[in-house]
Amino acid sequence: MRNTNSIKKVKDKSKKWRDEVYSAKKERKQVFETLSGFPVEALYTPEHLAEMDYLRDLGFPGEEPYIRGVHPNMYRGRTWTHRQLAGFGPPEETNKRYKFLLEQGATGINGVYDYPSLRGYDSDDPDVYADVGRGGVAIDTIEDMRILFDGIPIDEVSVSLVSCQPIGNISLQSMYFANAQNRSIPFEKLTGTSQNDFLMETAITIAPGVLPPEASFKLSCDAIEFCTKYVPRWNPISFAGYNYREAGCTAPQEIAFCIANAIACSDELIKRGFDIDSFASRLSFFHSAHNDFFEEIAKYRAARRVYCKIMKKRFGAKNPRSLMYRFHVQTAGVALTAQQPLNNISRAAYHALAAVLGGAQSVHVDGYDEALCTPTELSSLTALRTQQVVQLETGVTNTVDPLGGSYFVESLTNQMEDKIHAIIEQIDNMGGIVKAVEKGWIHNEISSAAFDYQASIESGGMPIVGVNCFQIEDEEIPVELFESPETLKVQSEKLKKIKKERSAKDVQKALDSVFRCCEENRNLMEVIVDAVKVYVTEGEISKTLKRFYTVWDPPLF
Amino acid sequence: MKGKKRILIARLGMDAHWRGSIVVARALRDAGMEVVYIGNQMPEKIVDSAIQEDVDIIGLSSLSGNHMILAPEVVKLLRKEGLDDVMVIFGGTVPPDDVPKLKQAGIAEVFGPGTSLKKIIGFVSN
């Protein structure tokens, strides 16, 4: 765009157009801005991209700075993975849902765990009886993991473990790997992702009595190290920007917190003696697709360019895969409404379209009933069909990065990038993301953003159809609601039986070695993969970890 | 006469969502109430805190689906302690059929997704 003469002409004409033509027109509101507060002008022209150097700033897909996509052919080759989230009740029930989704054309598994399993509790713990089997599948021992993947070819299908909190993940991921060994599937054949993000434990789904940030962060890095050594095709972490956004973050915060987290993990792994290129290609990201269509597309594109620059300049990464920002997208749950729930089908379709135009590697579309209950079979199927409609009917997969070069999208991408860099710098100045969590800075940033968001809904500045406009009084909800299957009894009985049949001596030995491993500050996954094989429960492992690392009450309010 | 209204906000059980409870807590504080936020707790602890903090209202939050088990338990324990004047309200994701059941169990009001802060503040102030 550096043809200065031509840009000058556009600028002059643009000014004339604004002054003489546009200024006479009325606008329907005073301020136009994106959901995250970036100003939006009436029209974008080459003058907005006057500084852009095509080869330097955009380049080609599959090449630096990867803004146009991480693969040269993007969806003209392979389309994104249709990875629908599923998980509820006991593993026997979720196993059926996985198989149903695979039969219906899903191309990957995305398994979420129930609230107790995410936080490292067994189903029979006195504090969790009301939440067993809710929000995901209940897993207590390796036997549950066996049942969950029974009959599913885990050497062929890629599996995402939505084990977001490191305290739960260290056991769940170990059970998954140990179960593969029991099925004689070598680690080299396993493909998938575990979420394993310490921010989830200490700043996002927070509760009192979690692991201190530094300990939770250590566990997440142990899993990365373990996979780097033994499970080469596994993504041992998926920075959970989606959840940061759900908790209240803005779009640039969502990306900046993820990248600041990736920086901390990279620093730690390098400190442990690993070369950046030995693990960076396996760091992956998880993002939201929220309401502001173009802002979301700009967000994904900016993330790719920021990350490439950081991995290259800050860490000296040389392997092209280390520079690639690969991500999964889930359509924004927080944008769904309980009112007129079928409207959510159209919302989620726009969200999914933004993810695809932003170059996502895999996508989950939310069920239309998620503001009311766990998705039913019908809503899960409709969500999967939404992906298939976007892929097969809209034609958006025919060319790579179709919005690249749009004056508006490129300008917004540039603004987004500047903001992301500024937030990362702020976190750097605090001593990194772990310190920013310890101080409560992250919590405060997120809750302030959440409050501002709610305030703009209240003021009517942010219209939400069915909520603050076009409401229906005394609406009859036209959807069939999900009934959670009996889980507490099923899981408690299994636990009782396993505890009776397992070797108490082996269990004690395994737990002792976990504790010793903490004392010696060695890699915990190395011992936990063995511990779960003798039927040590998830709760027993997390209690041992908490005994050593103690617990932390995050700054809540 | 007591001065400011005192309200305890707690998330039930293992529920993982804090956005709603924090936003409501902040709005109530900005509206001039004294807010005690205790995060995730089980019913016994919530009632203990309500006694210690001498609150007028307990606001429970949950999106996990545990509401039918834990919210009535809070009311039951409160009444057992003789705290008949403490009002309990609930906010979160609740299937429509459960709303009358929660009210039957002694929950004064249920605020679902999309409820305006104005409405909640209005209800709590009166």
Image (cartoon, grey):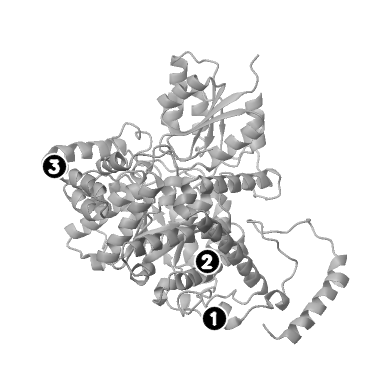
Residue drawn at x 42%, y 59% is: A264
Q: Which of labels 2 and 3 is toward the front?
A: 2
Whole-number angstrom distance, CA of label 3 to CA of label 1: 59 Å
Which chain letter goes with mark 2? A
Please identify the quadrant where the C terminus of chain A is shown: top right
Residue A546 in the image: above or below residue A277: above
Please identify the quadrant where the N terminus of chain A is shown: bottom right
Does label 3 or label 1 sit earlier along the sequence?
1
The residue that disc 1 covers is A59
SS state under label 1: loop
Q: How far across and down, in percent of the image, does residue A208 sit?
A: 42, 37
Q: Which of labels 3 and 1 is toward the front?
A: 1
Which chain letter goes with mark 1? A
Does label 2 or label 1 sit earlier along the sequence?
1
Left/right of residue A357 with respect to residue A409 in the rendered view: left
The residue that disc 2 covers is A303
Does label 2 or label 3 sit earlier along the sequence?
2
Q: How far across and down, in percent of the image, does residue A419 sit?
A: 60, 62
Q: How far across and down, in percent of the image, does residue A360 sit?
A: 48, 67
Q: Which mark is residue A502?
A: 3
Say which amino acid is labelled 1: Gly
Say which amino acid is labelled 2: Ala
Pick the front one: A514 or A449 = A514
Say which amino acid is labelled 3: Arg
